[in-house]
């Protein structure tokens, strides 16, 4: 790999499915009360920025999913909280030739829910 390839940055795109998943997480926090939803709003932008920074520089940071509904995608865990609802699994696809990443889904780490 040349120095130029080593420094290549990928463009990160968020799919509509990802937005729907964020809406569901927001709805959950909204049900918990005003303070909780305000807290979520303060964290959501930081989370997106961190995902963007990480994946644009290190597109293969997440492990490749080998089986199940997300087979073929990569999976990254965001968060280090002891409260599992505050840790998330982010599923994404890397398009090496295009230098692009589609962030497809985000689920609470505790979720056993299947992909639709």
Image: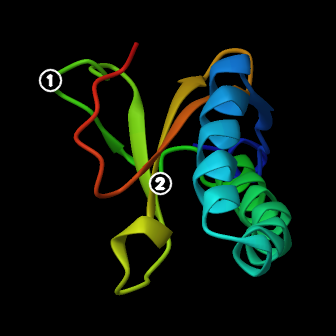
Left or right of 97: which side holds 75? left
SS under mark 1? loop
Name the residue beneath numbered marker 1: 67
Q: Position of residue 6 (x, y in %)?
A: 67, 51
The answer to whether residue 101 is visible is no
For the point 72% across and 64% down, the residue is 47
Given residues 109 and 65, the one toward you in this image is 109
The answer to whether residue 81 is visible is yes
Left or right of 70: which side holds 44? right
Given residues 7 and 102, the one toward you in this image is 102
Q: Nearer the viewer, mark 2 or mark 1?
A: 1
For the point 76% across and 56% down, the residue is 48
Quarter of the image for residue 104 reads top right
For the point 36% across and 20% down, the residue is 115
Quarter of the image for residue 110 reads bottom left
Above or below, 92 relative to 97? below
Q: Position of residue 85 (x, y in %)?
A: 42, 66
Sequence-first disc among 2 and 1: 2
Left or right of 59: which side holds 22? right
Name the residue beneath numbered marker 2: 61
Quarter holding the C terminus? top left
Q: Position of residue 9 (x, y in %)?
A: 79, 45
């Amino acid at each position: 790999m040349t120095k130029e390839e080593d420094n290549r940055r990928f463009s990160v795109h968020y799919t509509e499915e990802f937005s729907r998943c964020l809406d569901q997480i927001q709805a959950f926090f909204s049900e918990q009360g005003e303070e909780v939803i305000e807290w979520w709003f303060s964290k959501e932008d930081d989370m997106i920025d961190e995902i963007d920074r990480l994946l644009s520089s290190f597109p293969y940071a997440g492990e490749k999913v080998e089986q199940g509904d997300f087979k073929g995608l990569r999976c990254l865990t965001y968060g280090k909280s002891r409260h599992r609802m505050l840790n998330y699994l982010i599923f994404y696809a890397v398009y090496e030739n295009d230098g692009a990443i589609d962030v497809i889904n985000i689920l609470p780490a505790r979720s056993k829910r299947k992909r639709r």
